[in-house]
Amino acid sequence: MVKLTEDMKVVFTKNMEKLFSVPMATASKEGVPNVAPMASVWLEDDETFWIGDNFMVKTLANVRENPKVALFFWDPETKRCLQVKGEAEVKTEGPEYEIMHRRIKEKKPQMPAKSLIIVRIKEVYECTPGRVAGNKVL
Ligand SMILES: Cc1cc2nc3c(=O)[nH]c(=O)nc-3n(C[C@H](O)[C@H](O)[C@H](O)COP(=O)(O)O)c2cc1C
């Protein structure tokens, strides 16, 4: 696992403040790609995202058979963009699931909060346009 730096965490915060969601890419075990927007996303610690599953269909099926996922987030002011590759684990019970469930229900009681996807960060790349694009930064 790798740890996001303070400046990287700012990019995620700005993304969520201004854009409200991040694209989450997954793939089936045969390699069929899928991407979907996710707004219930928390940077739980420097190396872990939590993503709340309310309406996931292919995303959930994919992470159950292939844990490799990718996300990107960017700051529309600075244009800094970071791609994260990670490994997902699905939780439908236990203390972490309960915390996520409570968080979602407190904000939006109508949401089902079916499961928690824990994404452990393995690699980070720049997707900022220009010279640094594609650089592996973590
Ligand atoms: C802006 C936005 C944010 C969303 N956030 C979430 C979310 O946090 N969790 C979730 O389960 N679905 C969320 N959705 C709905 C999913 O993207 C939608 O159910 C999609 O079909 C999931 O993709 P899949 O069917 O390929 O799994 C969001 C949709 C939009 C447009």
Image (spheres, rainbow, N blue to C red):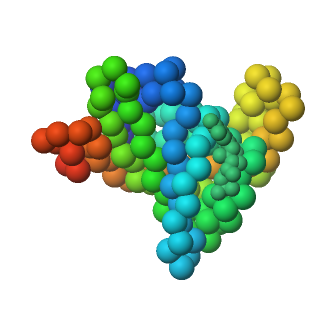
Frontmost residue, 52 versus 118: 52
Residue furthest out toward the left: 131
Q: Quadrant of ligand 1?
A: top right
Q: Position of residue 102 (x, y in %)?
A: 78, 30
Q: State whether residue 112 is above or below residue 69.
A: above
Residue furthest out toward the right: 110
Q: State whether residue 95 is above or below residue 28.
A: above
Name the residue located 34 percent from the left edge and 40 percent from the top edge: 82
Q: State whether residue 4 is above or below residue 90.
A: above
Residue furthest out toward the bottom: 30
Q: Position of residue 54 (x, y in %)?
A: 75, 44
- State which quadrant residue 73 falls in: top left
**Left or right: where 96 falls relative to 26:** right
- Number of callouts in the render? 0
Q: Position of residue 3 (x, y in %)?
A: 36, 39
Q: Is residue 80 among the parts visible in the rendering?
A: yes
Frontmost residue, 134 versus 44: 134
Q: Is residue 94 among the parts visible in the rendering?
A: no
Name the residue located 76 percent from the left edge and 22 percent from the top edge: 107
**Left or right: where 11 falls relative to 96:** left
Name the residue located 58 percent from the left edge and 43 percent from the top edge: 37
Name the residue located 38 percent from the left edge and 33 percent from the top edge: 74
Frontmost residue, 130 versus 83: 130
